[in-house]
């Protein structure tokens, strides 16, 4: 094959600045304990597909019905991605074109609602997502949003409140799923409420989709009318989104994604998702997903032993929400000190937080990325120890730097998928 590619200068030759930043980011990801609950490390294979020439191609439409010629390979990619995801989740219909989770959710509004319709979802301060109708999002501005919350005593979803609000406000869409909720979602209970009022039940499983695929969290597929997800969290795929739905909703969902909301799909992302779906169908992935939860529980227990306070008292999934109030420090300065020590998480509101969202009481931790490095229970105890050292030395920069050295040493023993330093 004749190609100009081997005569072309590499990224490091054409753009040393961006190349240098990417290399620095590789090092940061390798040397840090990454515990942002929505992040992960994709495999080298997923990275390769993401960086492929499929990025060069426009494919508006769906396989076999495109608005541009030259689709032989992109059709094959999308068909494969859909069939792998369909099989992995047991879904009747799959759309892999949403650019991410927020566009996937917007497509659901477009498919089923008119502006001004009522929608219900877990409120953002209680652990919900912006696009489930929160007031600063388009979904809270163009629709009438009635958020539900968690119980003040247990911080678990208040299903009595969900039912009461649903009967009173009769939403068109009822969302379940969230971004900072550490407990199992009771999809059948939401189904029963949706049935009472004739609502479309939407399960947003962005955070737990890898756990669902592996059977480690119950699946809403076959229960919810529509299931939305990102593809890059516990599922360990590329940045992207997808919608799974019952066959009866397939046309509405497909029309809402394209031409309703988006133009051409990102074919390189679709290919990488197909690769991730293949990986997620293996016994090794099932073990990985189970270990994410084992690690989250172990980290939670180790933090409790050290006097940290966990919202809901623990976790059933990949994440922990920690109330820093008993430690006498707010979430933001603690997250900043942790980062200085090489541990990366995000500060987060806790339910009924008396503090502001930009300076809240809590932090959110997740174990998907560190579990991808094959860290286990022993390392969770070590990490909890580092976290305790940070909280007791929050203003002691030299001690934070010493912890950073220890964190770096821990990380050096655990290869990071996709990163070759
Ligand atoms: N930003 C994602 C998260 O961190 O949970 C949700 O969209």
Image: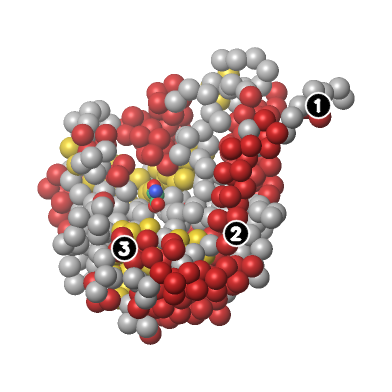
Horizontal and vertical percent for residue 146? 18, 46
Q: Which residue is mark 1?
A: 7
Q: Which residue is mark 3?
A: 333
Q: Which mark is residue 73?
A: none
| Residue lying furthest front | 398
Residue 248 located left or right of residue 136: right
| Residue lying furthest bottom | 305
Q: Residue at x 57, y 44 (%)?
A: 21
Q: Residue at x 44, y 58 (%)?
A: 36
Q: Locate the C terminus by quadrant.
A: bottom right
Q: Is residue 261 visible?
A: yes
Q: Earlier in the sequence, mark 2 or mark 3?
A: 2
Q: Residues within 10 Å of mark 3 (few under 14, many from 20)?
A: some
Q: Residue at x 52, y 42 (%)?
A: 239
Q: Locate the N terminus by quadrant.
A: top right
297 versus 240 height, above or below: below
| Image quadrant where residue 71 sits | top right
Q: CA distance from mark 2 to mark 1?
A: 31 Å
Q: Which residue is mark 2?
A: 30
| Dot 2: element | helix
The residue at label 2 has a CB less than 8 Å from ligand 1: no
Q: Earlier in the sequence, mark 2 or mark 1?
A: 1
Q: Is residue 185 visible?
A: no
Q: Residues within 10 Å of mark 2 (few under 14, many from 20)?
A: many
Residue 169 located left or right of residue 401: left
| Dot 3: element | helix
- The answer to whether mark 2 and mark 1 are in CB contact below 8 A is no
């Amino acid at each position: 094959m004749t190609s100009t590619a081997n005569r072309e200068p590499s990224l490091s030759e054409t753009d040393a600045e961006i190349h240098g930043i990417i290399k620095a980011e590789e090092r940061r990801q390798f040397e840090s304990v990454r515990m942002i609950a929505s992040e992960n490390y994709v495999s080298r294979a997923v990275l390769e597909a993401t960086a492929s020439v499929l990025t060069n191609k426009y494919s508006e439409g769906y396989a076999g019905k495109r608005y541009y010629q030259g689709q032989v390979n992109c059709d094959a990619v999308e068909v494969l991605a859909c069939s792998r995801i369909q099989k992995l989740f047991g879904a009747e219909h799959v759309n892999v074109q949403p650019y991410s989770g927020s566009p996937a959710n917007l497509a659901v509004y477009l498919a089923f609602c008119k502006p001004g319709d009522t929608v219900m979802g877990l409120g953002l301060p209680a652990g919900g997502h912006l696009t489930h109708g929160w007031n600063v999002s388009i979904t809270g501005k163009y629709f009438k949003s009635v958020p539900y919350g968690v119980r003040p005593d247990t911080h678990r979803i208040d299903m009595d409140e969900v039912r009461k609000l649903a009967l009173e406000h009769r939403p068109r869409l009822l969302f379940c799923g969230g971004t900072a909720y550490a407990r199992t979602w009771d999809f059948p209970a939401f189904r029963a409420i949706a049935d009472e009022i004739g609502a479309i039940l939407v399960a947003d499983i962005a955070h737990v989709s890898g756990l669902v695929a592996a059977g480690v969290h119950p699946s809403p597929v076959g229960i919810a009318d529509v299931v939305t997800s990102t593809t890059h969290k516990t599922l360990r795929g590329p940045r992207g989104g997808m919608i799974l739905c019952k066959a009866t909703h397939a046309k509405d969902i497909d029309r809402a994604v394209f031409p309703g909301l988006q133009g051409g799909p990102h074919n390189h992302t679709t290919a990488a998702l197909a690769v991730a779906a293949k990986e997620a169908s293996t016994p090794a992935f099932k073990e990985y997903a189970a270990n994410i939860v084992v690690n989250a529980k172990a980290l939670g227990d180790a933090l409790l032993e050290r006097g940290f306070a966990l919202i809901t008292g623990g976790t059933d999934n990949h994440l922990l929400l920690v109330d820093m109030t008993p430690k006498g420090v707010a979430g933001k300065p603690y997250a900043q000190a942790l980062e200085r020590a090489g541990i990366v998480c995000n500060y987060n509101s806790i339910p009924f937080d008396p503090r502001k969202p930009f300076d809240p009481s809590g932090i959110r931790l997740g174990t998907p990325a560190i579990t991808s490095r094959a860290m286990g229970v022993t390392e969770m105890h070590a990490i909890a120890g580092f976290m305790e050292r940070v909280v007791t030395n929050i203003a002691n920069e030299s001690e934070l730097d010493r912890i950073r050295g220890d964190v770096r040493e821990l990380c050096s023993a655990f290869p990071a998928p996709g990163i070759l330093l």
